Image (cartoon, grey):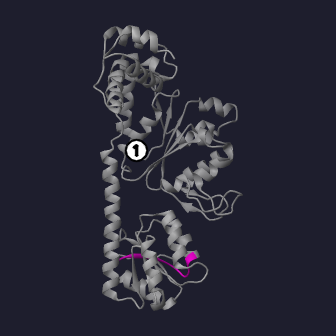
Amino acid sequence: MPHRNKTNDNAPLILVVDDEVSIRKTLIEILSFEGYKTHEASDGEQGIKIFSEHKFDAVLCDIKMPKMDGMEFLNKALEIAPDVPVIMISGHGTIETAVEAVKKGAYDFISKPPDLNRLLITIKNALDKGTLVTETKVLRKKISRVQEIVGDSEPIKRIKETIDKVAPTEARVLVTGENGVGKELVARWLHEKSTRNASPLVEVNCAAIPTELIESELFGHEKGSFTSAVKQRIGKFEQANGGTLFLDEIGDMSLSAQAKVLRALQEGKITRVGADKDISVDVRVIAATNKDLLEEVEQKNFRLDLYHRLSVILIHVPSLNDRRDDIPQLIDRFLESICADYGIAKKGIDDSAIKLLQQHNWTGNIRELRNVVERLVILSGKTIIADDVKNYANP
């Protein structure tokens, strides 16, 4: 059970793993007195279970323990959450092992019996480092801005307005549209403008994952739960905890996986394949599809209750053929980025070439337009003309 400080529920959460009851209780008392929240475990196996179920800020772990020793715990903990600092607790006979643990990724080690001042300073430094790592990740995320949604056509204006209204809420969104129209970009902006944007946006292409593996991908699995499960796997729902999960092409998801996704949305809990214990998750789900899901419901390929859970807000992204006025802006943006990628000066394009491209039947939508512009950049002269479009627009 967690020991919660009554005065500060937002205090850092620390896991104490030690098989010696006296040491464990002493550490818990010290940490609780200093205002930290704690969980405790009596061995490495129990420690890993607890560690995988909660979001810890730091860990204190003994080295010599039954069932699973501290070194094995460290290896598994670093696989699950590599940014959480693990401080090893070592007896006199395990100092060399403790040094080895630091080389393998432990933050530091403390000798038994622990010196109070050394313990608290080490924990404070470890927590400061963890905060710095988080802030650095957020800063990198802000630097690598999401690509702009290009266009001033009425449908695009409506989409941008809807994103601005919906993104700050917790409402689930279903994004519909043909392949290549930019559904993923809409999902990215919904996350970027949300209150969850400091946490991860995790993307899953349901159409690209074999049916027999989709549940493992989404919910994770325990070691040995099936033939190829050689180690524990953390699923996408857990990876997205606190952030956003983007389920692309959800119309291709199996009915059994749909049932589990529905439960996750209803109860905020998931169960790894091969496990019998629930794990709480806090995830906002955005889904996308190129299919008519209500038609899929009629054909018994999609659950109606899941459809209603996902489609609190519907955003339809039009085909490029339905927003031809945006094509000149898109061409200009692609010329700029493609020429920069190739390290050449931005090429021009004359009006007659643009008009021909506006008349083209864009069955592949924006993805196809970008490919065509790249082909024109490679094969044309300094300025792209109508003859270039006639010769190279079609493969």
- Few, some or many residues within 10 Å of mark 1 (<14, 14–19, 20+): many
The question of residue 109 being in magenta is answered with no
- The kind of secondary structure element at disc 1 is helix
User: Three-letter amino acid code at disc 1?
Assistant: His
Viewer can see residue 15: no
For disc 1, the marked residue is: 191
The answer to whether residue 51 of the structure is visible from this angle is yes
Instruction: Please provide percent x and percent y for residue 200.
Output: 42, 51
Q: What range is drawn magenta here?
A: 35-44
Seen in the picture, residue 89 relative to 160 is either above or below; the reply is below
Q: Is residue 384 above or below residue 250?
A: above
**Quarter of the image holding residue 110?**
bottom left
Q: Vertically, is 85 above or below 251?
A: below
Q: Residue at x 36, y 21 (%)?
A: 331
Q: Is residue 36 magenta?
A: yes
Residue occupying the point 38% across, 39% down? 189
